[in-house]
Image (tube, rainbow, N blue to C red):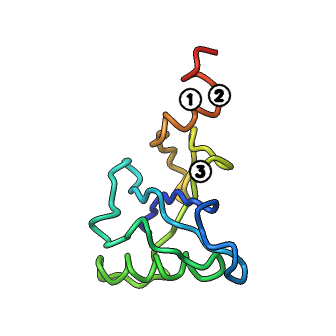
Amino acid sequence: MPTFVIQKDYETGDTNAPGGTFQVIALEDENGNDLMDDFGIDPSTLYPIDTGDAEIVSQIGTVLELDPADIELEESGPSTPCIAASNRQGRVRKCTRPWLVQSLMGWNHGQ
């Protein structure tokens, strides 16, 4: 089952939409390769929080010619920094956003 790491921006979304929206900041494979362009994910698109993941998985499935049920999204972001994560197969992947961890820890400010 392919697993993709998605980072979402909930702050820029439309707060007037029922349930809210998000934009995709990054979409990577387990090796940290950026796949936004490959899957046609536009970072300015607003996705509804309740159905956005399904829309993105469907889009990935169309490109890869896979059943969306066979695709997994793993969210990484400021609330869930990617220091190390284990997918369903138990493999640990490296942090694909070290700058995020650094900014959360204050390392980029000399602290």
**Amino acid type, callout 3:** Gly
How many neighbours does mark 1 have within 10 angstroms: few (below 14), some (14-19), or many (20 or more)?
few
| Residue 5, image x, y percentages | 48, 57
At mark 2, the secondary structure is: helix
In the figure, residue 104 lies in which quadrant? Answer: top right
Question: Dot 1: what SS?
Answer: helix
Badge 3 density bin: few <14, some 14–19, many ≥20, Cα 10 Å: some
Give the spatial CA distance, label 3 vs label 2. 14 Å
- Marks 3 & 2, CB-CB < 8 Å contact: no
Dot 2 crowding, Cα within 10 Å, few <14, some 14–19, many 20+ = few
Q: Quadrant of residue 82?
A: top right
Which mark is drawn over residue 102?
1
In this image, 51 relative to 68: left or right?
Answer: right
Q: Are marks 2 and 1 in contact (CB under 8 Å)?
A: yes
Residue labelled with disc 2: 105
The answer to whether residue 98 is above or below residue 32 is above
The residue furthest top is 110
The answer to whether residue 77 is above or below residue 100 is below
Mark 1–mark 3 distance (CA, rounded to whole Å): 13 Å
Mark 3 or mark 2: which comes first in sequence? 3
Rendered residue at 29%/78% (across/down) = 63
Residue 2: image location, x then y, percent: 41, 66
How far apart are labels 2 and 1 at the CA level? 5 Å
The amino acid type found where label 2 is placed reads: Met
Image vertical order of residue 97 relative to residue 12, above or below: above
The residue carrying mark 3 is 77
The residue shown at (60%, 79%) is 48
Amino acid type indicated by mark 1: Gln
Q: Nearer the viewer, residue 68 or 51?
A: 51
